[in-house]
Amino acid sequence: MTESVAGPALRFANPPGLAPPPGYSNVVEVSEGRIIFIAGQTALDVEGNIVGRGDFEAQADQVFRNLSTALECVGCTAGNLVKLTVYVRDMGELAAYRRARNRFFATVTPPAAPAVTLVEVSRLFADDFLIEVEAIAAAGRRQ
C-alpha cells in the first residue's frame, strides 16, 4: 500500500486493491483535530470580477488561489486538504485542470494529494464559469 502521513491527524493511502490514482489519494483518514469545509470556489477575484473569461486554465489557477486564501484564514495550506470535489464544464479540459492542480499542490512539501472527485456538469451558477471546486480540509486543534 502506498501511504504517507501528514502530521498526527492525517493519513493518505492508495491500497494495492485499487488502481493507482494520478495525483490524488484513494483514501484519506482524519484521526483527530478540526474539519474545515470550504464552499465551491470559482474564478472570481477579490473585487468579484471573473478572471480568465473563456480561458479554463486561467480560471483554474484563480480557483486554486481562492482555495489558498480560504485555507490561510483558518491557518491551513494545501497540505491540509483531504477532499476536493471538482466541477468542470468540459472534460476535454482535464489536462489544463491537472496542470493548475499540480502547481497548487506543489506549494507544499510533500505535494498535497487529497481524495478527489471530478465531474463534468452542463452548467455552473453563471455561464462564464468553467470550473468550480469545493474542499474539505483537516487540521490540528486550535490553541
Image (tube, rainbow, N blue to C red):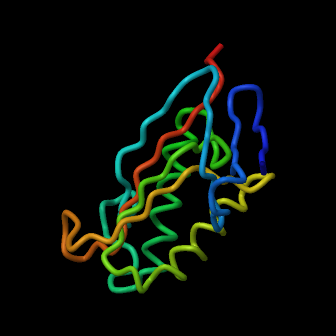
Residue 35: x and y in percent read 51, 28
Residue at the top extreme? 143
From the viewer's perspective, tell me whether residue 116 is left or right of residue 113: left
Residue 60: x and y in percent read 47, 71
Q: Is residue 12 above or below residue 46?
A: above
Q: Based on the displayed image, in which of its 4 quarters is residue 53 positioned? A: bottom left
The residue sitting at 69% across, 49% down in the picture is: 15
The residue sitting at 39% across, 74% down in the picture is: 51
From the viewer's perspective, tell me whether residue 26 is left or right of residue 39: right
From the viewer's perspective, tell me whether residue 123 is left or right of residue 98: left
Tag count in the figure?
0
Residue 16: x and y in percent read 72, 53
The residue sitting at 54% across, 42% down in the picture is: 71
Q: Is residue 30 above or below residue 52?
A: above
Q: Nearer the viewer, residue 17 or 72?
A: 17
Residue 102: x and y in percent read 65, 68
The residue sitting at 51% across, 46% down in the picture is: 83
From the viewer's perspective, tell me whether residue 72 is left or right of residue 38: right
Q: If the image is split into quadrants, where does the C terminus sit?
A: top right
Q: Is residue 120 above or below residue 69?
A: below
